[in-house]
Every structure is written in C-alpha cells, then in structure tokens.
Amino acid sequence: MSDIEYDNLFKELETLEREYPEYKLPDSPTVKVGSTGAKKFAQIKHKVRLYSLDNTYSYDDLALWYERLKKNYSLDNDPKLVCELKIDGLAISLTYKDSEFSFGATRGDGITGENITNNLRTIKAIPQKLPEKLAELEVRGEVFMPKSSFDRLNQLQRENNGKLFANPRNAAAGSLRQLDAQITKSRDLSMFAYYGRLDSNEQNIDSHSKMLEFLSSQGFNVNPEYKVCNNIQEAINYCKYWDKKRQQLDYATDGVVIKIDSFILQNELGFTSRAPRWATAFKFPPEEMSTIVEDIEINVGRSGAVTPVARLDPVYISGSTVQRATLHNFDEIKRLNINIGDRVLIKKAAEIIPKVICVTQHATDKKSSFVKPEYCPSCGTKLVEQEGEVNLYCPNHLGCPSQIKGRIEYWVSKDCMDIDGVGDSIVAQLVDRGMVTTPADLYRLTVDDFLKLDLIAEKSAQNLYDEISSSKNPTLARFINSLGIRHVGKETSELLARRFLSLENLKNASFEEIQKIDGIGDKIALSILDFFSNSFNNELLQNLKLYGVIPQEMQVNEGSDKFKGLTFVITGTLSDTRDVFADIIKQNGGKVSSSVSKKTSYVLAGDNPGSKLTKAESLGVKIINENEFNQLIGE
Ligand SMILES: [Zn+2]
C-alpha cells in the first residue's frame, strides 16, 4: 500500500469512528498511535529463547565450520545452506494469535525483552493481520532505518538543533524505544523478517527457505537478496559478492548469516550453551583500518597525471588486501605532514581506490621531508604544471611506459572492454617488450606472441587470444568509455551512446549538440571535441577499425511515456542483465523497484525467480515473462 493510500484510509477510519463510535475497536490503529504507555516498557519473557550467533571474520573459518559439522555428524552429502544479509538494526520478536498481531518485544538478553507492541504497530512493514488462518505464529526480524531516511532525519535534527544520530542503527533503536509511539510513527522504520515459528505445522514447512517464502506469502517483508546455496563455496561467494556490493543497498548490513536449510538437520545439530550449531555469522571487515606508511611513491596515470601514492604495510579492508593508497597530490602531503613510518588511517569506499585519510601517529616530529619530483619516474621527461591544477603532468603521452600501461589496463578493465585474464603483469610485459603501445595493438597479437611471455602456458595463451577476439563488438557505451576521454566515465558514455547512436555521429557532433545533453556540460563537451581532433586518437580509432573492433550501433529508441505511472520489479535470469531491462523501463517512463508490494504494476520474471514471484502471486500482482514484456513495449 502506498503512503497516500494508507493515509487516506486512516483518515476515513477516523471519520467513521467519530460518526459510529459504537463500532470502534479497542485495538484500532487510531488509538494505538499516541498512547504513551508506562514510563518504562514492561518486560516480556520470550516463549522460545533468541540465541545469538557465533561470528567469524574469515572465509577459512567458514569452510572449517561446515567441514566440522559434516564430520561430527557424519553427513555424506553437502547440506544446503541459506545465506541472508545480516541487517544492522534492532532484533525483535512478533507474536500473532489467531492471525492477528498480538504483541511484540525487543530481543533484550534473549530470554526477556521489552514490550514495544504499540511502537511496532506504527511500522507499515509489520502486518496487523495475516491472510492465512494461523493459531499462533512467532516472527523474528530486524527493524532498521533506510540510509536515505537516516540522512533525512539527521538533516531535520540539524535544522531543529536536535541531537544527531551516529548511524542508522542507533537511529532505529532510538526511534523504536520511544515512549511516545507518535514519534516512532514519524520515523521511517522498516523491518525484514528472517525467522518464523508455527505452533502447529500444518503447512509442512520443512526448511528455512520454505519458511522465508511462507513469511513472504503472509505479507512480511523478507529481504529479497537471500540465497539458497548448495555448499559452503557458494556461500563464501555470496559473502564476497555482498562485501563489494553492500554500499549500494539502502540499508546497512554488517555481514551474512549462514544457516543449514533443512529443519530436520537443524534439530539434529541443536545448540551449544550460547548459540545454534546450525548457523553462523560472517562479519564483513571494517572499511577503515590503520597501518604504517612504508614508502611514498610516484604514480604516473594514463593521462600523464603524476600523483604521490603511499606504499603501505599490507592491511585487509573491505574484502581485499590494500598495499597502496593515494595521497591525491603534493599539497596533500604537506597538509597531512606525512613521513615514511607514520601510522595512517586508510579508507576504502566502494569501487574507489583506497585513500589516506589522516595521520594517527607521527613517526618523527620533523616536518614532511618529501620533495616534489622534477622528472617523470617512468620515462625521465621533465614534468610540467598545468594552469589551474595542483597536479604535475608528464607530457610524453605517446612514449611514457607508465601512461601506455595505464591506458591498456583501463581498456581491458571491467567497465570498459571487460577482457578477462589480461591482468596488470601481462600488460606490463607486453608494454615493456614493445609488443603493445596502444589498445589497438592487443588485437594484432597471436597465440604465439602470448607464448613468448613469462609464465604463460599454451592453454592460457589461447584463452587470452580468445578473450581479446571475443571483445571486438562491444556496446557503443562500453567502447566510448574505453577510449578514456577526459571527464567521460561510464555514465556519460551511456548518455552519449543513447544520444548519438553511432561512433560516427559522435565524432561529427558539434559542441552545441554535445553540451545540450542533460547531464553533460561545457567541460565535457570541450574534452570530447579535443579528443576527436587529436591525430593520435584518430589513428587509434582507424587501427581499431582495421583490426575489426567495431562498436554495435544503437537501436533507434527515442523513448516514450508508455510505462508512465507503472512500477516494475525485475527478478530471475533474463536474456540480458537486469540493468538493461531497467534502462528500457526507465526510457519508457516507468519506474523500477527492488521489492514487490501492492504498488507494483508488473513483475518481470525470468528463470529461477525466487521469493519475489511468490510475493507477487500472494499480492495478486501481474507477472509477465520477457516475451510479454516485449509485447508491452511493442504495442
Ligand atoms: Zn613519463
């Protein structure tokens, strides 16, 4: 239900209750909100204890946990696992009697919690009534505040000179434990359900994954990202994936909960005094770490920009080992007053090079002794300054090995031509041996050429050749991005591809035509014109064409408002990535949402659609396959 629908119904109920007070129910939502209750919350003893989970921080420990279970309980086959994101919120328990929400409590110490029923009733993600007839159901979940709501709340607090919350978790906890439920209601809280317990199991639910589907069918918000895994390796891959992607979610997650799926097996494994044996939690590593600066090196980027980089005592942050962090520019070294041997704080944001935030402990009380270099460390050319910029540049664009390597590394990278296997060490060998000076040269190489490199076996030489060959027809957006035009990244490339449809059109575009595009300004337009007027770049484009590297032309699609007012949810495996379908929907004026609700107009379902389909069915949302989707656009 949308907020507007909810508010309208709420107002209608208030009017009806005023006119016909004899029909007003004692537990009506209109009386629940605002009831302040006692000074303190009453205690509630949980019927079934809420255990905490054992934590691990390493993938090796996860594998050990699984192997130990298999060995100790003589399991011959790999038991199935369910992986769920561990939401960083507040654990709660909800009890439904005769299909109605009866009471809810905080986790407390696991045995006794606080009765916060009135506050929980204000959260829309918590159903008041269940569609199915159930004598008793206990549901556990995590109440959280979306990151976007958290930002809004703190903005509001700032405007009203109120106290700022440190993080979404604190804000959720603070909002939930308000004595005045009206305040709770004003905070945008939500909940993900992750556990259900039925008193009599007439539904024959025999696994955790089936329970999640059941909860979803009863109107609970189940996190859509959960996954059933066949073995521990799949679970580890799930953890690795979300360690990288978690920043993109609108809610905070600090790890992954991994459970044995089968209830029979869960019962067999049982509990230790502290925690269930059949579940464990993998905690994501922290995103800021402190380490020692071992050296300050000079890096020459693909555009010739010369930047200082700190070489670090290796430290593990956000799923990978960091050995280098950028210091941005030479003024920054002065500002931080950084010396070799200093202890520094390193931060790694999603898909961005790690950076040094500050010095936490100076190794010496001397001023930073670092001096700006005069010559390029890669090619020896005298460095130049560019007007209005703090960076130094190596002007030897065509001959500087560092710049050549940088351009090739960028060309093969994931968001560009996405050529697997051509790693930094291979690029370094190809450039150092003079086999490659521009990206076009990659497409001239033979299997024999690769065999000349160090540590390359015949099979991988063939693989490298195949990978490079199969990248010859990229999408236009990918191709534009790969060119490395200054100020033109992934998103700008997509805008340009959509507007100009072919490389030829883009090359012939005028300053006005480019600059007019929404999201592209003068600076980018100038940089594009600059790029195509450069003879070196034109030679590169000609050579690429010569070797058969030709971007696909875009289909003419002017966009429409065919899907205006419609909301789609995409699930399962389709013939292309979900992003592609999301783009089509947006181009036609529609919206894409990540979870199914009554507001959803269509669920576009591919293979293995999972829980979203179940939820769509239970809510009566129309489900369409790819063919039907294509028909919708074609109409
Ligand atoms: Zn150089």
Image (spheres, rainbow, N blue to C red):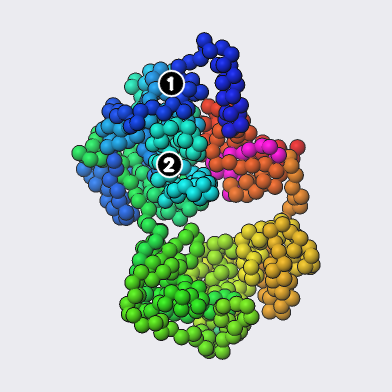
Q: Is residue 138 above or below residue 500?
A: above
Residue that label 2 marks: 172
- Quick check: is 576 in the magenta stretch? yes
What main secondary structure does the magenta stretch of the protein show?
loop
Question: Vertically, is 491 above or below 261?
Answer: below
Tell me where the magenta segment starts and ends, as one range.
563-577
Image quarter for ligand 1: bottom right
Instruction: Residue 563: name its quadrant.
Output: top right
Relative image position of residue 258 (x, y in whole percent): 35, 43
Quarter-of-image position of residue 478: bottom right
* Quadrant that contains the C terminus: top right
Looking at the image, is mark 2 or mark 1 earlier in the sequence?
1
Decide if residue 413 is on the left or right side of residue 79. Answer: right
* Residue at (52, 88) in percent of width and height: 374
On the picture, is 276 further left or further right than 497? left
Identify the residue shown where x is 51% and y is 14%.
24
Q: Are marks 2 and 1 in contact (CB under 8 Å)?
A: no
- Amino acid type of the residue that numbered disc 1 sits on in the rendered structure: Glu
Residue 436 in view here:
no
The furthest residue to the front: 161
Picture disc at residue 100: 1
Mark 2 or 1: the one toward you: 2
